[in-house]
Amino acid sequence: MRVLFVCLGNICRSPTAEGVFRRKLSEAGLAERVTVDSAGTGDWHIGKAADARTSLAARQRGYDLSALRARQVEVADFSRFDLILAMDHSNLRDLQRMQPAVAQAELDLYLRRYDLPLDEVPDPYYGGADGFEQVLDLIEQASDALLAEVRQRL
Ligand code: 4NP
């Protein structure tokens, strides 16, 4: 199974989703069976490491995002992945606009898919440190639910 997480810049939310889910998979002994990646709808940060505030908040919870580099989502991703999970409504709309008519990937909003109290992972980029903690809180919850889905599908 192949899962792609998508946000706007690919330096805050989707790398966090990737790092958290990679660790869940590895703890579950499923790392070899699931391909995980992340991308941004925008092109501003291509090639860059995760935002320093994102990396720090993640590291404090034991997630290492240092190997991740930002890339932009591309049409080919719709055939490379089974499930593409958007962080907010705007990301979802941008993805829907670029989705090819015959697309293998299922497209969904990450939190809504698992009925979490919020629909979206709020963009933390222009806010304070609390925003980065909230991103981790939401993504850790969604990640547990995604792991349960993956276990069923494998
Ligand atoms: P992300 O956060 O989409 O979670 O990676 C953002 C990163 C950069 C910008 C906006 C959001 N930006 O405007 O550069």
Image (cartoon, helix red, strand yellow):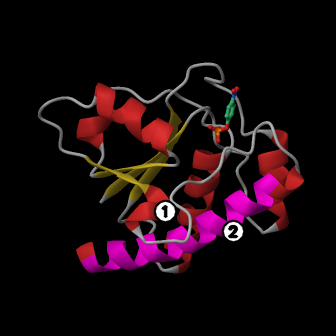
The quarter of the displayed image where residue 64 is located? bottom right
How far across and how far down the image is residue 119, in percent?
Answer: 50, 59
Q: Which mark is residue 137?
A: 2
Helix or strand or loop: what does disc 1 sit on? helix
Tell me if label 2 and label 1 are in contact, CB under 8 Å.
no
Picture quarter with the N terminus: bottom left
Picture residue at 49% right of the left edge, 71% below the top: 25
Reply above or below: 126 against 37.
above
- Any part of residue 13 in sight: yes
Q: Residue furthest left?
A: 102
Q: Which mark is residue 15?
A: none
Q: Residue furthest top?
A: 44
Reply above or below: 10 against 44.
below
- Any part of residue 30 in sight: no
Sequence-wise, the earlier of marks 2 and 1 is 1
Picture residue at 63% right of the left edge, 48% below the top: 13
The quarter of the displayed image where residue 154 is located? bottom left
Mark 2: few, some, or many residues within 10 Å (few <14, many ≥20)? few
Which secondary structure type mostly characterizes the magenta part of the structure?
A: helix
Where does ligand 1 appear, by image quarter?
top right
Picture residue at 52% right of the left edge, 69% below the top: 143
Reply above or below: 104 against 144.
above
Reply above or below: 97 against 37.
above
Of the residues shown, which amino acid type is indicated by label 2? Asp
Magenta-drawn segment = 131-152
| The stretch drawn in magenta includes residue 102 | no
- Does the Cβ of the disc 2 residue fall within 8 Å of ligand 1? no
Q: Which mark is residue 111?
A: 1
